Amino acid sequence: MTMDLYWKNSLHEDLVCDLTFSEDLSWGPAEIQNFLSVSVDDPLISLDNFNFVYEAVSPRIMRLTLSPKGYTFIYNVTFNFKTKTLTNGQYDFAANMYRFSDLNYDVSASMNWFLIKAPSLSDTEKKIMDSVSGIS
């Protein structure tokens, strides 16, 4: 298994974590959520302020997309992604019933994030801004 972190677009609004496996899985969002955890190094940043979207992109690629809810100011915060710890031989299995390698557990990667995302404007606010910008 490999873990890849990258930005969904050039604005860095969404942080993506792909887990690519060597065998097909029959996983859905719940299994991915149980296998992968996220933490941050800044106590002022709450993960409750982010949307987590878990999806099976293909039978071998599981994805987590992390995006802030609403207005956000993130300054040089490290986001840490880690697969679960193997405990008491409780292995996960591929679709063909091959058990996961020990190397698939406790895999981690980190990414620093800097983002300023302004709140969305309502239609009324947009009209006001349009009328003010037309004055000059």
Image (cartoon, helix red, strand yellow):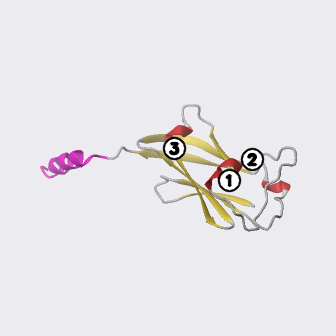
Q: Position of residue 119 (x, y in %)?
A: 36, 43
* Residue type at tag 1: Glu
Q: CA distance from mark 3 to mark 2?
A: 21 Å
* Numbered badge on residue 108: none
Q: Nearer the viewer, residue 34 or 37?
A: 34
Number of residues whose C-alpha sits closer than 10 Å to that of mark 1, classed few (under 14), some (14–19) or many (20 or more): some
Q: Residue at x 55, y 42 (%)?
A: 76
Number of residues whose C-alpha sits closer than 10 Å to that of mark 2, classed few (under 14), some (14–19) or many (20 or more): some
Mark 2: which secondary structure? loop
Q: Residue at the left extreme?
A: 135
Q: CA distance from mark 2 to mark 1?
A: 11 Å
Number of residues whose C-alpha sits closer than 10 Å to that of mark 3, classed few (under 14), some (14–19) or many (20 or more): some
Q: Position of residue 110 (x, y in %)?
A: 66, 48
- In magenta stretch: residue 133: yes
Q: Residue at x 82, y 55 (%)?
A: 103
Mark 1: which secondary structure? helix
Write down the residue under mark 2: 84
Q: Residue at x 61, y 43 (%)?
A: 78
* Residue type at tag 3: Phe
Q: Residue at x 52, y 59 (%)?
A: 8
* Residue type at tag 2: Lys
Q: Single out the mark in the foreground, 2 or 1.
A: 1
What secondary structure prevails in the magenta region?
A: helix
Q: Dots 1 and 3: beta carbons under 8 Å?
A: no
Q: Is residue 79 left or right of residue 2?
A: left
Dot 2 or dot 1, earlier in sequence: 1
Q: Is residue 11 left or right of residue 119?
A: right
Q: Dots 3 and 2: beta carbons under 8 Å?
A: no
- In magenta stretch: residue 84: no
Write down the residue under mark 3: 50
Q: Which residues are magenta?
A: 121-136
